[in-house]
Image: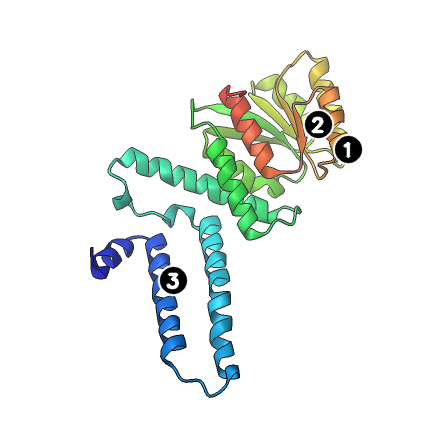
Amino acid sequence: MDFSTTASKLSRGPLGIIALLIVLVYALASIVAGAATFSSSMERIPLVYFMVLFPVLVLGCFTWLLARHPTSLYPPTDFKDERNYLEAQRIARATGALVAANLASTSGKSPDQAVAEAVAAIDQAPRRGEEGRCILWVDDRPENNRLLRDAMREFGIDVHIALSTQQALDALRRQEFSAIISDMGRVEGPQEGYVLLEAVRSQGLRLPFFIYAGSNLDEHRKEALRRGAQLSTNDANELFRQVIRTVSGDVS
């Protein structure tokens, strides 16, 4: 297959265009490096810097594209079955939201690490099951978790938000939920997550309870388990993976 045919097929989607750009730029740079006559080594340095830094720039652009426009990565013509295309779009949106949540967290992850971990978490999550599953998320700053909620919604999970322990208990009396996610410290107190957990368990509710807080220390994880929670973490990927598995009935 000649280059023109390959280029024509690659140019149908953003990923193919990026691949073509990399090939053409490196081909041009190689030709210049091999054919040009440099009077001194200093004249060659800008070209060397370009060839070294260009992959970093491409990685940054790809990360931005994945986080901000995940549904534009693949054209419909890449899929013979429309259902496969819609599924790919859904997975892309969930992955993009999870990558953005990783980058927005305080864990200090690099872009490539955020992408790799998000893709792994999505890959390990069960595929979308029944619609209508709903979880209760208790946090007095829900805007901090918007991206992670978006990723969960792509897997068919609705999220009901409560801003306080009392709001959460009122919601539990009115509606059935598949699981509860809570932060730890709120305006009500520095360990309000445990207060809510104790109140939930004292009512005989055995709902899966996940604590999503700023600490990931082993002692805090053990204390949460001792009190009856299923997980305590500050990692968006871990929370996403465990919630999806639990709500989907996959406990493997």
Q: Are marks 2 and 3 in contact (CB under 8 Å)?
A: no
x 39%, y 72%: residue: 29
Residue 103: image x %, image y %? 58, 49
Q: Earlier in the sequence, mark 2 or mark 3?
A: 3
Locate residue 58, reporting x and y percent: 45, 60
Give the structural element (helix, strand or loop) at label 2: helix
Q: What is the crowding at mark 1: few (fewer than 14 residues within 10 Å), some, or many (at least 20)?
A: few
Label 3 sits on what residue type?
Ile
Disc 2 from disc 1: Cα separation: 8 Å
- Identified at 24% across, 56% down, the residue is 6
Residue 171 rendering spot, x and y as whole percentages: 61, 23
Q: Quick one: label 2, few (<14), some, or many (20+) residues within 10 Å?
A: many
Task: Say left or right for 17 vs 133.
Answer: left
In the image, is 141 to the left or to the right of 154?
right
Q: Is residue 60 above or below residue 87?
A: below
Q: Residue at x 35, y 62 (%)?
A: 23
| Camera-nearest label, 2 or 3 | 3
Residue topped by disc 3: 22
Rendered position, 141 above or below 22: above
Q: Nearer the viewer, residue 160 or 156?
A: 156
Q: Amino acid at mark 2?
A: Thr
Q: Is residue 45 above or below residue 216?
A: below
Residue that label 1 marks: 188
In this rendering, which labeled residue sits more in front, label 3 or label 1?
3
Q: Secondary structure at mark 3?
A: helix
Residue count near mark 3 (Cα–Cα under 10 Å), binned few <14, some 14–19, many ≥20: some
* Mark 3 → mark 1, Cα distance in angstroms: 54 Å
Question: Which of the marked residues, 3 or 1, is nearer the chain's N terminus?
Answer: 3
Residue of label 2: 165
